Image (tube, rainbow, N blue to C red):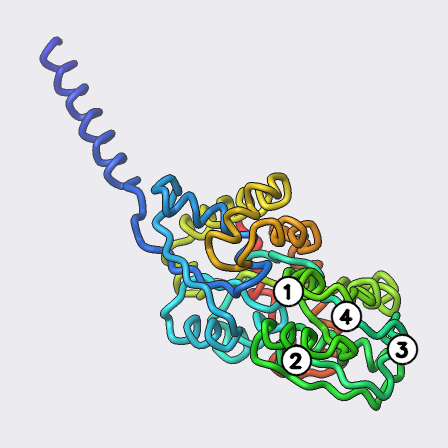
Amino acid sequence: MKRLIAVILAALLAIAACACAGEKKDETAIRVGSLKGPTTMGLVNLMKKTDNKEASANYEFTMETQADAIAAKIVSGDLDIALVPANLASALYNKTNGGIRVINVNTLGVLYCVTGDDSIQSVKDLAGKEVILTGQGTTPEYSLRYLLDKNGITDCTLTFKSEATEVAAALAEDSTQIAVLPQPFATVAQIQNDALHAAFSLSDEWDAVAGGESKLLTGATIVRADFLKDHEGLVKQFLKDHAESAKAAVDDVEGTAALVAEYGIIEKAPVAQKALPFCNIVCLTGDEMKTALSGYLQVLYDSDAKSVGGALPADEFYYIGG
């Protein structure tokens, strides 16, 4: 009997050992790309944990100044997860024939009209004016064009710069110019030149014409479909870690501002501290994410189909989890 019990115990231990081996942690590196601005500001707490070797997964972070650079790396497979302009997420889904999934919305509206011209108080006042901005072919351009169209404005000229810092420099040179800037650069520009002010928020203007059917979004997080299929556990872990990092950006503004400066997003922490509350950093997932993003993409599609890549993405685009 004792011998039989010993044999049974040995078998149970072997089964347990096999089970543990099967549950070995996935050590695959997760290559994450983001844009210099609010999307990375929502990530900096996770980036710091990674540098301190305290993160729950093996992350590698890349920050770019232009959306095209991020898009090229996700398409080529050099990135696994990317934080991109919301409309670009849909465009990449179409470009890759469904090779992209969206996993969260990471920022809501962060676009502001900044100028020293006191006559500019709403989108209607942009008639006959020139507006300088970044983001050609992404959220800033299509959001502004939608608002201009809804307000019946056909004679506003849009002039594009490659980076927000170039827009800020143009405003510093001539404060009567009109610009659309995302946070934190809208705040930075006003701090650098007290002749400037935020004339209006594009989010408020959007709400005024959308009738509650949609909201202005700025950023979404995407993952390569192949990576999600092979490493769904890692993607779920990233979502958890991203949510914690975004929450820390909202709850611990001072601490996050210090990291924003440390990682070179904004040069000075006090400036970052002023900008963070206006960055609308979130981590919307599941059905909440799908509802918010699909409504936004529908508005853009109805206005200009090419803004979302020519077609609205299929339901498979939205990773609800499970």
Where residue 40 sits in the image (x, y, percent)?
Answer: 53, 57
Q: Residue furthest bottom?
A: 155
Is 177 on the left-hand or right-hand side of 56?
Answer: right
Inter-mark Cα distance, 3 to 4: 12 Å
- Depth check: 286 or 274 in front? 274
Which label sits in the foreground, 4 or 2?
4
Q: Which mark is residue 198?
A: none
Measured Cα–Cα span from mark 1 to mark 4? 11 Å
Q: Nearer the viewer, residue 268 or 79?
A: 268
Residue type at numbered disc 3: Lys
Q: Residue 306: x and y, percent?
A: 65, 84
Of circles 3 and 2, which is in front?
3
Expressed as whole percent of the image width and height from the top left, the position of residue 310 reads 63, 83
Q: Vertical placement of 133 versus 85: above or below? A: below
Q: CA distance from mark 1 to mark 2?
A: 24 Å
Residue hosting label 4: 113
Q: Mark 1 — residue?
A: 185
Q: Residue 123: x, y in percent?
A: 85, 75
Q: Earlier in the sequence, mark 1 or mark 2?
A: 1
Residue under numbered circle 3: 124
Residue at image mark 2: 307
Which residue is outermost to the top? 2
The amino acid type of the residue labelled 2 equals: Ser
**Depicted 198 relative to depicted 269: above or below:** below
Q: Is residue 171 above or below residue 282?
A: below
Q: CA distance from mark 4 to mark 2?
A: 21 Å
Question: First in sequence: mark 1 or mark 3?
Answer: 3
